[in-house]
Amino acid sequence: MKANAKPQEKNRYSPDELQEFKELILGKIAKAEKDLELLQQAVAGSENDVSDTAPTFKTLEEGSNVLLKEENQKLAARQQKFIRDLRAALIRIENGTYGICQATGKLIPKERLMIVPHATMTVEAKEASKKRK
């Protein structure tokens, strides 16, 4: 090796690192599924009985319930997307593409993946793609 040769840049995570990410993702999926179940129960159970209250209050209460139900439905949809993204990350671990930026082909920093384990781009690539939109 030449004295001025650069060390080769890492372009894949090791099997041990991938296992660490897999465990992190599985834990996040388990928590997200519990949260989703609570949201779905809240949506299904938001039919409070206001039959014995004054008509004006009943109308206000029903309007409030509709808003709450819509908000819970939005949160549930976001939670479902989050779970799908985490499962897609598990597939990338299995097929050997996990942690590789889809835009640049460079390795996504481990620190980023520990915070956002379903990330598919480096922060720089994500910001650049937002500027192009």
Image (spheres, grey):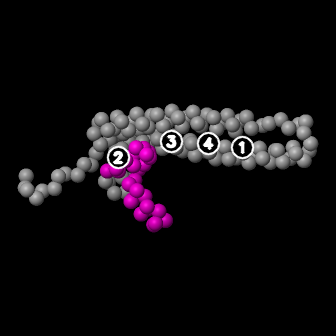
Residue 27 image position (x, y, % from top left): 46, 34
* Helix, strand or loop at mark 1: helix
Cα–Cα span, label 3 and label 4? 12 Å
- The x, y position of residue 95, in whole percent, is 34, 40
Query: In the rendered image, is residue 94 in sight?
Result: no
Q: Is residue 59 left or right of residue 118?
A: right
Query: Magenta stretch containing residue 132, yes or no?
Result: yes
Marks 1 and 3, how far apart at CA: 22 Å
Residue identified by numbered label 1: 69
- Whichever of labels 1 and 3 marks the residue nearer the N terminus, that label is 1
Amino acid type at image mark 4: Ala
- Chain part drawn in magenta: 107-133
- Can you identify the residue that label 2 sits on? 110
In-front residue for pair 120/38: 38
SS at mark 4 in the image? helix
Residue at 56% across, 41% down: 80
Marks 2 and 4, the one that precedes in the sequence: 4
Give the residue number, with chain letter if any, for mark 4. 76
Q: Amino acid at mark 3?
A: Arg
Residue 84's label in the rendered image is 3
Q: CA–CA distance between discs 1 and 2?
A: 38 Å
Spatial separation of the CA atoms under disc 2 and disc 4: 29 Å
* Secondary structure type for disc 3: helix
Q: In the rendered structure, are the residues bearing label 1 and label 3 in contact, judged by CB atoms less than 8 Å apart?
A: no
Q: 22 left or right of 13?
A: right
Are circles 1 and 4 on residues that touch, CB within 8 Å? no
Contact check, label 1 and label 2, Cβ < 8 Å: no
Taking the spot 36% from the left edge, 36% from the top edge, the residue there is 20
Label whose residue precedes the other's in the sequence (2 or 3): 3
The residue furthest left is 2
